[in-house]
Amino acid sequence: MTEEFRTQCRELMARFPQARSALLPMLHLAQAEDGYVTPEAIRVCAELLELSTAEVAAVASFYTMYKRHRSGTYHLGVCTNTLCAVLGGDEIWRTLSERLDTGHDEVSADGTFSLERIECQAACTHAPVMTANWEYLDDMDVDKALDVVARLGRGEAVRSTRGPVIRPFTDTERTLAGYDDGLAGEGGTADAKMLAGVAYARQHGMSAPQAPERSPFDETSGTDDAGGAPAGDGEG
Amino acid sequence: MALTPVLTAHWDEPDAFTIAGYRRHGGYEMVGKVLGADPDRLIQVVKDSGLRGRGGAGFPTGLKWSFVPQNDDKDHYLVVNADESEPGACKDIPLMIANPHAVVEGCILAAHAIRARRCFIYIRGEVPQAVRRVRAAVGEAYAAGFLGRDVLGTGIDVDIDVHAGAGAYICGEETALLDSLEGRRGQPRLKPPFPAVAGLYARPTVVNNVETIANIPTIARNGAEWLRQMGTEKSPGFKLFSVSGHVNRPGVFECALGTTMRELLDYAGGVRDGHELKFWVPGGSSVPLLMPEHLDVPMTYEDMQAAGTMLGTATVMVFDETTSVVRAISRWIHFYKHESCGKCTPCREGTYWLEQLLADFELGRAAQGDIAKVDEVCKQMFGRNFCPLGDAAATPYAPALKYFRSEFEAGTHTPAHELFDPLASAVFTPSTVGAAP
Ligand SMILES: Cc1cc2nc3c(=O)[nH]c(=O)nc-3n(C[C@H](O)[C@H](O)[C@H](O)COP(=O)(O)O)c2cc1C
Ligand code: SF4
Ligand code: FES
């Protein structure tokens, strides 16, 4: 590992009350360097944190995002947890895996893509869900999935449905290690599905109760009447 | 009950996730006021509000805060659980993407209440967009003087670190999360001691769900009585619900607690056209499924429990008649097997056997006695695990068997995909499947 990697690890370690807390970010940083957690990275992390390599390896192997072989430039995830699977995720997986001739946790022959059957991505409203280097590709179908792969393979820009243009795997890992990528403004506030409730409420004139004039923290006579009123019993 | 947009109210504004967008609607106004008051004041307001934790268990938040020893000389920590990985749950991630400043302001206020100077937000690593939005919000809050040393001249210091996980559902369990944050394998700890006494670095720690924390600024601003105008006595307030699956308009819906699934289905445009509701799961895969006959049960902690399930995360999954219940359960069991941390035997071994047995049903090659065998394994597991994950793994089967026994019987001779064409349950039209790009 480079001297710069060690320096950055020391920076991460200094951020926490106890240095070992930096281990997860350090392993993300290792993947930002090499595309996976190399045996050398494990040795260096162990040395910096004064742990045994076995202790660091035990942590690295516990978490699914840490890879033991180099990921493709684009690490593609297809959610095959129940909801996405039932809504078509299994078909997307089967087609992609066949088209790229690549199985779960494998890398395509040219090293461009790695594939993973991923678990629920907290995006079930947008099922079937895929990720590319962990950026959301929502509301997928088989054709869209093949199109994304074709475009990424040709080196074209593909934008996440709720985030930035997809960058190489190592760049995402640097973000996860704790480094600002300047991309927080990409992707808008919310898409139509996140806005479904707001839109319905607007249409039907529904809203939360009117906010009171005063807050319990606006200085009053000094009584600590913080609103401990008897419970409303709800109107429903 | 009705839709009550609070946290979601301004999500249709393009800059709602920035500090300018947040402050336009009163954001950060409570920081000076709350930090200028005695910390116990906020604990009392939150207690009076009846707010219950949004991470799934519904523990009263004010009560949890009051367990932290108040005037010891130790460092205290606030740890925000943003690991959202429960299958079906999709409300914390949208919240962090669209309204990260509500989380940040909530952290500042909650940290004051529990006398913590340091707060960690632990976000699942698989969603970099949430990580960068929350991290940017923290940066903006520092720049505006709401974080750091001597916040707004109150003499109080508050720091927030945003920490990305690395892919492990079990790290959502609060003590496993703490171990993970300490740089270890994420395995649950024995309780007691509870985190409030010995949490992060063995110091008093409050772990709260990220939605719970985002509730705090509004409750501080509007008070307990206002919150109690929504919901029921035991489940006051508003909640982020989501509806996913076989509905016409899946999405996020912020409603008063006590809203029924019938109402939610209406907001979500109904079951997809030409199909009918088969079963639904109210709060993530760890809670028992419900049937059409339960559509009018108020979605509160207490009513869901009375109906034999749990509100959980209030993130509803809807499945229509094209869905094989065997396939659905089998896939969830596969998930629990994959995510079992291996620390205790009933869960580690139980999920191993359950996965194989359920796969046999799905492939149509289960033996006659397997229906009872699965039941037996679940019973052996239930209540014997170190943490609730093991119980969760043993949960989905029994209600599925109760309502859909014939599908499990069919699993002794016919594969699920022959009984239920997978393409019929997909939401894209089969004609596009396999078409050349
Ligand atoms: C296996 C498992 C996974 C969990 N995952 C989460 C999670 O992702 N987010 C969360 O807030 N709580 C999760 N919990 C619940 C937490 O242990 C804890 O109860 C919660 O964070 C407390 O916050 P609250 O009181 O604000 O709800 C999980 C629990 C278990 C057993
Ligand atoms: S129940 Fe499962 S996840 Fe929980 S401690 Fe035991 S083995 Fe680990
Ligand atoms: S099941 Fe795929 S995102 Fe939740």
Image (tube, grey):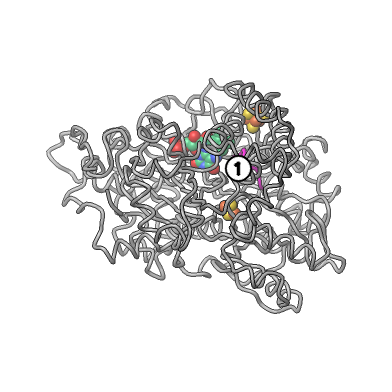
Amino acid type, mark 1: Phe
Residue B38, visible in the rendered structure = yes
Please identify the quadrant where the N terminus of chain A is shown: bottom right
Residue A129, visible in the rendered structure = no
Q: Residue at x 15, y 34 (%)?
A: A223
Q: Position of residue B62 (x, y in %)?
A: 35, 33
Q: Residue at x 19, y 54 (%)?
A: A210
Tell me the crowding category of disc 1: few under 14, some 14 to 19, or many 20 or more residues within 10 angstroms, Cα based. Answer: some
Q: Position of residue B321 (x, y in %)?
A: 53, 52
Residue nearer the viewer, A161 or B118: A161
Residue nearer the viewer, B361 or A74: B361
What residue is shown with label 1? A16
Q: Residue at x 56, y 65 (%)?
A: A139
Q: Position of residue B191 (x, y in %)?
A: 55, 22
Q: Which residues are magenta?
A: B167-171
**Can residue B277 be found in the magenta stretch?**
no
Using the rendered view, name the quadrant where residue A235 is placed. top left
Using the rendered view, name the quadrant where residue A175 is placed. bottom right
